[in-house]
Amino acid sequence: MTADEFRAALARLAAGVVLVTAHDPEDGPRGEDVGMTATSFLSVSLDPPLVMVSVRNGSRMDDLLERQPLWGVSVLAESQRHIAGRFAMKGRISDRLLFEDIPYERGKETDAPLVRGALAVLECRTEQRVPAGDHTLVIGRVLRTDTPATESGPLTYFRGRYRQLG
Ligand SMILES: Cc1cc2nc3c(=O)[nH]c(=O)nc-3n(C[C@H](O)[C@H](O)[C@H](O)COP(=O)(O)O)c2cc1C
């Protein structure tokens, strides 16, 4: 099996898109926020409530979550494709600029930016880190959730493109 064959098979798994975020208390005088678009997010356990995301080793998010355990997840709505696109870019511009015109609230438990208009937001504390190839499985305990009233559909990713359901 080639890498292309591997990618082609997985591209046929429709996935919800989330923005994983965290606040870096050490980076700069006022701290900096980091965000990463992800489709590897999933629920792991009900009791205790655990979720997981697979984070590429050496990425900005990996570096931050090695140092501090608090992070947030925003489940993106179909209208938030531009946010997913922006936070999937390799970090050439400052993280602070990436968040500049995006409405968010800071998580009560984690200080992580939680995107306004997301279908749901979760705040998590890392419970376990499992090395897995060129990624690390970051398993987090869910400290708080918020599911605002909305009729909006989810942003999904399928065959290499962002999609709306239906
Ligand atoms: C649809 C989509 C899903 C992604 N899912 C993940 C993921 O689950 N884990 C991950 O580490 N990177 C994922 N990425 C890539 C990251 O969003 C991107 O590489 C990262 O934000 C760049 O950070 P860096 O500049 O620190 O490498 C995904 C990208 C896209 C477009």
Image: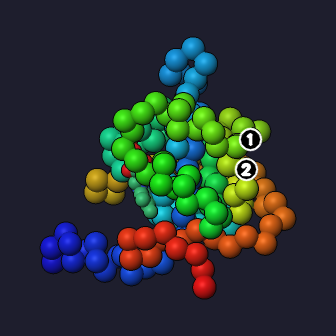
The outermost residue toward the bottom is 166
Residue 152's place in the image compared with 109, above or below, is below
Which picture quadrant has residue 110? top right
Q: Identify the residue position indicated by label 2 in the image.
A: 116
Residue 14 place in picture, x, y as percent:
48, 78
Is residue 68 visible in the rendered image? The answer is no
Q: Quadrant of the N terminus?
A: bottom left
Give the residue displayed 81% in from the left and 60% down from the top. Answer: 148
Name the kind of residue labelled 2 in the image: Arg
The outermost residue toward the right is 149
Q: Identify the residue position indicated by label 1 in the image.
A: 105
Residue 97 place in picture, x, y as percent:
53, 32
Q: Is the residue marked by circle 2 packed among few (<14), some (14-19), or many (20+) residues within 10 Å?
A: some
Which picture quadrant has residue 82? bottom right
Q: Quadrant of the C terminus?
A: bottom right
Judged left or right of residue 157, residue 127 is right
Judged left or right of residue 93, residue 106 is right
Mark 2 and mark 1 in contact (Cβ < 8 Å)? yes
Mark carried by residue 34: none
Give the residue displayed 80% in from the left and 67% down from the top. Answer: 150
Is residue 21 visible in the rendered image? The answer is yes
Name the kind of residue labelled 1 in the image: Glu
Q: Is the residue marked by circle 1 packed among few (<14), some (14-19), or many (20+) residues within 10 Å?
A: few
Which type of secondary structure does the marked residue at label 2 adopt?
Answer: loop
Residue 10's place in the image compared with 45, above or below, is below
